[in-house]
Amino acid sequence: MIAGDVSAVTMKAMEFLSVGSPLQLVERPMPLPEAQEILLEVLACGVCRTDLHIIDGDIKDVLPIVPGHEVIGRVIAKGDQVNRFAIGDRVGVPWLGSSCGRCDYCCHRHENLCDEPVFVGFSVDGGYASHCIADADYCFAIPSTIDDVHAAPLLCAGLIGYRAFSMCGDAMRIGFYGFGASAHIIAQIATGLGCKIAAFTRPGDNAAQCFAREVGCVWAGGSDMLPPFELDAAIIFAPAGELVPQALAAVRKGGTVVCAGIHMSDIPSFPYELLWGERQIRSVANLTRADGESFFTAIAAIPVQTHIEVFPLHQANKALERLRAGSITGAAVLVP
C-alpha cells in the first residue's frame, strides 16, 4: 500500500441496517485498499433516488451497507498496482464500482451489463461516510473547474442521464418526465446542443416547472398534459410506470421512449396503437467507462451548473426524506 496522510484509525459512516429503519451514524475501523483500490477521504456525496430504492427495499443486496454512489473524494492511500491516480488527486466514484472483465458483455466494453457487477453503495460500501474504498479503474478524474459539491451529482444523475440522452439518437424535440437531479443537468447539455426540451412534472408542481424553464426548457407542464409540439423522443426519469403510455402518446411515429431509472413501478397495459408506428421503448442499465469519458468531454464544451442543496453527513435521513417528498430543487449533496 502507498499512503499519504492516513492519520485517522477510524471513520464515520451512515449505515443502513434494515428496510424501514433510518440510517445510523456509526464509527468503523479505517479500511485499507487492496492492490487495485484507492482509499478516499470523501469530500462530497450526492443523494440519488436509487438510494431511496435501496432503503425502501425496491432493490435488494448486501446489508448492512453504507449507501452513496455519487462520490467526490481525495486519494489518501492506494494499492501497489494503482497507476492511474496519485496521492492527493481528486476523483469521482460512480454507481458501477467494478465488473468481472470476463463475460461477453465486459469483453465488448458493455460492462454496464456485466453478469457479476459490483455497485457502489449497494453491494459494497459507498460515500455516505468520511472515507471509502474504490476500484481505481472505475473512477473518473474530476475537472478542476467544478467544486466538490457541484461535481457530486454528475457521478450518477449526470452520467446515467447522459447515457439516456444518447439513446435518443438524433432527436431534437425531447420530453423529460420527472424534473429532478438528472433532468436539470441533461437539459442544460441538450439545450446547449440545440435541442428543444419539454419538461413534465407532477401535476401542479409550479416550482419544478419554473425551475425547468430557468435551465432552458421551452415548455413545462404536468405529466398528465401533452406538450404543444410532437416529441421525437422522451426520457422518463421518474420511477413511475404509468408514465410510459403517456410518453408514448406524446412521441411521434418512429420515436423512442427511454426509461432511465434502475427501478420503476409496473407499466400498465396500454393499447397497441400507442406503440405502433415503429415507436420503441428502451431501458438504461448502469453506465460504461466510455460513458464517463464522453460525458466529461461534453461538459467541458457545454458548461453545466448543478443546482444543489447541501446537508451535513449526519442529516442524511433528512436529505432522503426531502428527496422522497420531491422538495429538493436540483440535487441533494452530503458533506462529511
Image: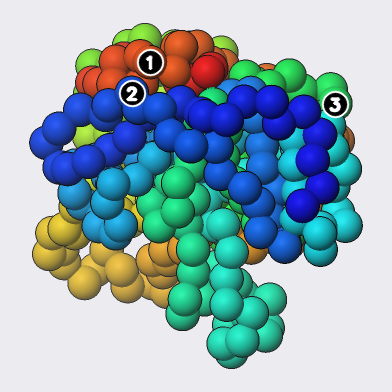
Residue 129 seen from this side: yes
Question: Under tag 3, what secondary structure?
Answer: loop
Q: Do the residues labelled 2 and 1 touch (CB within 8 Å)?
A: yes
Could you say which disc has been placed on residue 25 in the image? 2
- Which quarter of the figure has residue 207? top left
Q: Is residue 69 left or right of residue 54?
A: right
* Mark 2 → mark 3, Cα distance in angstroms: 31 Å
- Which quarter of the figure has residue 269? bottom left
Q: Position of residue 36 (x, y in %)?
A: 72, 61
Sequence-earlier tag: 1 or 3: 3
User: Looking at this rendering, what residue extends furthest in the bottom direction?
Assistant: 104
Q: How many marks?
A: 3
Task: Between residue 174 and residue 49, name the one nearer to us.
Answer: 49
* Mark 1 → mark 3, Cα distance in angstroms: 27 Å
Closer to the eye: label 2 or 1? 2
* Mark 2 → mark 1, Cα distance in angstroms: 7 Å
Name the residue type under label 1: His
Question: Under tag 1, what secondary structure?
Answer: helix
- Residue at 32 percent across and 72 percent down: it is 276
Relative to residue 161, is residue 108 depicted above or below? below
- Residue at 84 percent across and 22 percent down: it is 145
Residue 242 seen from this side: no
- Residue at 56 percent across and 44 percent down: it is 31
Name the residue type under label 3: Ser
Sequence-earlier tag: 2 or 1: 2
Q: How is the image coloured?
A: rainbow
**Residue that carries the numbered disc 1 in the rendered image:** 314
**Residue that carries the numbered disc 3 in the rendered image:** 144
Q: Position of residue 5 (x, y in %)?
A: 77, 28
User: Quick one: label 2, few (<14), some, or many (20+) residues within 10 Å?
Assistant: some
